[in-house]
Image: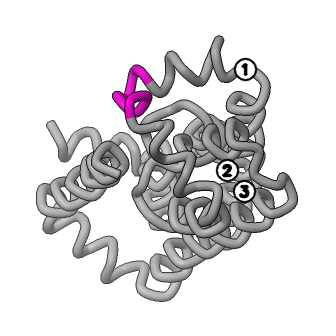
């Protein structure tokens, strides 16, 4: 089943609507969607290496714009939208404790969350809720998301065929490591 899903994603990755899907997933992941855009970015770059830099740029721009939506949710719609999202992921009980730390380290939280599997959407919402300076938020998001997506695209661009072979031969292992990193990111924020 995992092999069929991978093959389907890889075939979809070369299609005409793949960039729109990548942009959409990247945008919504930054504010409320739990699945990271890497799930599309990786097979898209593997499928069309010559577009690696375009895909990384698309992912970066749409992710940062989605982060601005997350900031807006936190700043303006916290009670109506952000609280239910934070409750859904089980983060509301730690939110007040987190504010004290966030006031001193906000830029670094945004930067760290933008680079790692840490749930970036939580930080975008928190940035708005805690009124982190918008230019600081924007620059930290742009730098960290850009680094993340361009590094992924660059590795796949320069080491494409070996990476593709590695992924295809060890699909179960790659998927398991990815899930562990994803769950680990959510667990990390839960225990902060």
Above or below, 162 relative to 72: below
Instruction: Residue 18: tell me if it is visible.
Output: no
Front in this rendered view, residue 167 or 173: 173
Residue drawn 46% across and 76% down?
A: 156
Left or right for 168, reference 140: left
User: Label 2 belongs to which residue?
Assistant: 63
Residue 110 found in image quarter:
bottom right
Residue drawn 27% across and 58% down?
A: 181
Q: Which of disc 3 and disc 2 is earlier in sequence?
A: 3
Residue drawn 52% across and 67% down?
A: 112
Residue 190 found in image quarter:
top left
User: Label 3 belongs to which residue?
Assistant: 58
Kindly state the secondary structure of the residue where label 3 is placed: helix
Please tell me how crowded label 3 is: few (under 14), some (14-19), or many (20+) other residues with Cα within 10 Å. Answer: many
User: Label 1 belongs to which residue?
Assistant: 77
Above or below, 153 relative to 5: below
Front in this rendered view, residue 10 or 155: 155
* Residue 140 rendering spot, x and y as whole percentages: 71, 66
Give the Cα separation between the discs numbered 1 and 2: 20 Å
Kindly state the secondary structure of the residue where label 1 is placed: loop
Give the Cα separation between the discs numbered 3 and 1: 27 Å
Q: Which of disc 2 and disc 1 is earlier in sequence?
A: 2
Q: Are marks 3 and 1 in contact (CB under 8 Å)?
A: no
The numbered dot on residue 184 is none
Q: Are marks 2 and 3 in contact (CB under 8 Å)?
A: no
Residue 30 found in image quarter:
top right
**Magenta residues, start to end:** 87-93
């Amino acid at each position: 089943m995992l092999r069929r899903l991978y093959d389907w994603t890889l075939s979809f990755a070369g299609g005409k609507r793949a960039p729109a899907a990548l942009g959409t997933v990247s945008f919504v992941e930054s504010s409320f969607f739990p699945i990271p855009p890497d799930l599309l970015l990786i097979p898209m770059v593997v499928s069309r290496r010559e577009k690696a830099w375009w895909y990384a740029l698309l992912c970066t721009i749409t992710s940062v714009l989605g982060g601005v939506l997350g900031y807006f949710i936190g700043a303006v719609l916290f009670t109506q939208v952000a609280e239910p999202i934070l409750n859904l992921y089980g983060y509301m009980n730690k939110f007040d404790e987190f504010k004290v730390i966030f006031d001193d380290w906000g830029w670094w939280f945004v930067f760290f969350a933008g680079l790692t599997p840490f749930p970036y959407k939580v930080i975008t919402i928190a940035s708005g809720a805690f009124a982190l300076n918008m230019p600081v938020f924007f620059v930290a998001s742009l730098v960290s998301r850009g680094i993340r997506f361009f590094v992924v695209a660059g590795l796949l661009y320069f080491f494409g065929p070996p990476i593709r072979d590695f992924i295809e031969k060890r699909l179960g292992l790659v998927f398991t490591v990815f899930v562990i990193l994803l769950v680990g990111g959510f667990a990390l924020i839960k225990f902060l």
